[in-house]
Image (cartoon, helix red, strand yellow):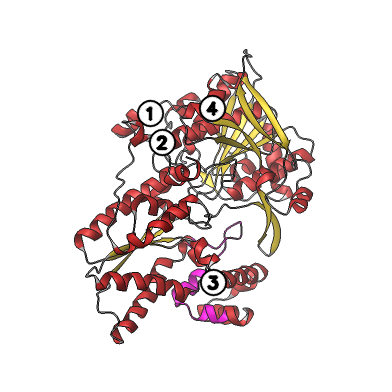
Amino acid sequence: MSDQISTLQKVRAGYSPKLPAALAGGVNKVVAQQGAPTGAAADEALVKSQFPHCFGQPVVTFAPGTADGVGQRLNVGVVLSGGQAPGGHNVISGLFDGLKGVHPDCRLLGFKGGPQGLVDDDYIDLTADVIDAYRNTGGFDIIGSGRTKLSSEKQFEQVKETALRNDLAAIVVIGGDDSNTNACLMAEWFQKQGSKVQVIGVPKTIDGDLRNEQIETSFGFDTAAKVYSELIGNICRDANSAKKYWHFIKLMGRSASHIALEAALQTHPNLCLISEEVETQQMTLKQIVDQVCDVVVRRARAGKNFGVALIPEGLIEFIPEMKALIGELNEILAKNKDYFATLSTNDDRFEFINRELSQPSSHAFSSLPTAIQEQLMLERDSHGNVPVSMIKTEELIIDLVKSRLNRLKASGEYSGKFSPLSHFFGYEGRCAAPTNFDADYCYSLGYNAVALIAQGLTGYMSCVSGLTKPAAEWQAGGVPLTMMMNIERRHGEDVPVIRKALVELNGKPYSEFVAHRHAWADGEQYLYPGPIQYFGPSEVCDQPTMTLILERG
């Protein structure tokens, strides 16, 4: 870290994150209580067959105990996996402090550059001097992150060698659903080999799609959603001041619309598309454009040629004809990867793709602008996902809305002026300094992971719940990773993965949005959340997201 730090960083370094009561007395005093055996999110028989050693473990909850003394000296490795999320440094701080509370000679090894650091045995010793420089800061720069997928026998053998060489008792994987799926694969492999190395996951993703009845939210969602909401509020105020621009804002959220929905609840834009609603209602791209145009035309008739529209990053994957198209493209590109790489021009690629696609998907593909076609053919990530952040969905919507409005103007049904501006808010929120909520939550997740390790558990995710209450009343424990899994199609194969949590259309956050969106569309009921506050009254500084309050409050 640079020697030059801001005034806020200096003051923020002194913030002491709060812990649940079960952990406040130290890991050595924790008492574990086990529930009944667990199943899977879906496809239980298939998940069980893939994870015979880890499957069926009970949910564990921790309670404060009275035991004292020094625990066993442990070496623990930690890896940051996937995209950045605010609070990662506090997870590592919690791990460090929890370990030092077990035994002063415990070591925390930070493997650099993501899971590849485990393969390469590339780490730094995370000492007090290193940790103290990163407390309550954003980013993953303490050890860096990466997206290497650990799945092959060779990779696991290399990780095992790293663990043996460094006498690791456990490995903590801080990541999202795909990264924690890999953590479970690694835990299963170690168990199969008769190795005592434990693997614990920590729920990270700003998208908010790694959650269930036990995992109430993933860390980083609170901070990122509030960063985006501040920016959206600023744009709402600018739109209402200038009164001449339509702002189309794409927000991160590849597989779910949690960020878009949370930002809408915090700012009250004129439009917010919800991917899950689009899929459930089987809306075509044309119907989505018509819906946007209806609001633009209505506002223009009232003399309001301006507005703000929010678009989830992964919207295109939820439109039925686009979802079918992308599914076929994934299969085609997976099966013909080497041949596709030899095609040197877009014309050759388009010809090949159209030849392989079904007739409906070929029609859908051919109807798209060339730029979008090119973006849909980009190389998939290591988990087989389309790089949707590279697909300019907001510009596609703008272009189609423009064309529709021109036709309406020609028929005399629209006489307004449409001046659109596009934005993509993504990286702006991934490394922000964590809110008080995320600072506390992340520190607790890290500290809690040490408690799981001390109990000899593996194949678990660190779980802290009851998050709408004061931190002292939060419950700590662990959830088996297999409990969250189902079978999905990836790279042309059926594989076990942690199931993503989508926006529930019968849930309270969505219902709150639906109850008000018509009024928001026609008026200017904008809210201006302002910047994140770190110092001041609890109702300003410590409140969780609207999503969490509505769901759990």
The answer to whether the residues at label 3 and label 4 have Cβ atoms under 8 Å apart is no
Residue to which mark 1 is pinned: 13
Q: Amino acid at mark 2?
A: Thr
Residue 89 percent coordinates (x, y): 47, 35
Disc nearer the start of the sequence (1/3):
1
Q: Nearer the viewer, mark 1 or mark 3?
A: 3
Q: Nearer the viewer, mark 2 or mark 3?
A: 3
**Residue 350 can be seen, yes or no:** yes
Q: Amino acid at mark 1?
A: Ala
Q: Secondary structure at mark 1?
A: loop
Q: Residues within 10 Å of mark 2 (few under 14, many from 20)?
A: many
Drawn side of residue 504 relative to residue 37, left or right:
left
Q: Secondary structure at mark 4?
A: helix
Q: Amino acid at mark 4?
A: Phe
Disc nearer the start of the sequence (2/3):
2
**Where is 453 relative to 51, above or below?**
above
**Where is 208 relative to 142, above or below?**
below
Residue 189 percent coordinates (x, y): 74, 43
3D distance between C-alphas at marks 4 and 2: 15 Å
Which sits in the foreground, 423 or 294? 294
Disc nearer the start of the sequence (4/2):
4
Residue to which mark 4 is pinned: 96
Residue 541 percent coordinates (x, y): 35, 35
Residue to which mark 3 is pinned: 322
State which quadrant residue 354 falls in.
bottom right
Disc nearer the start of the sequence (1/2):
1
Magenta region? 362-388
3D distance between C-alphas at marks 2 and 3: 39 Å
The answer to whether the residues at label 1 and label 2 have Cβ atoms under 8 Å apart is yes
Q: Is residue 374 magenta?
A: yes
Q: Residue at x 30, y 64 (%)?
A: 522
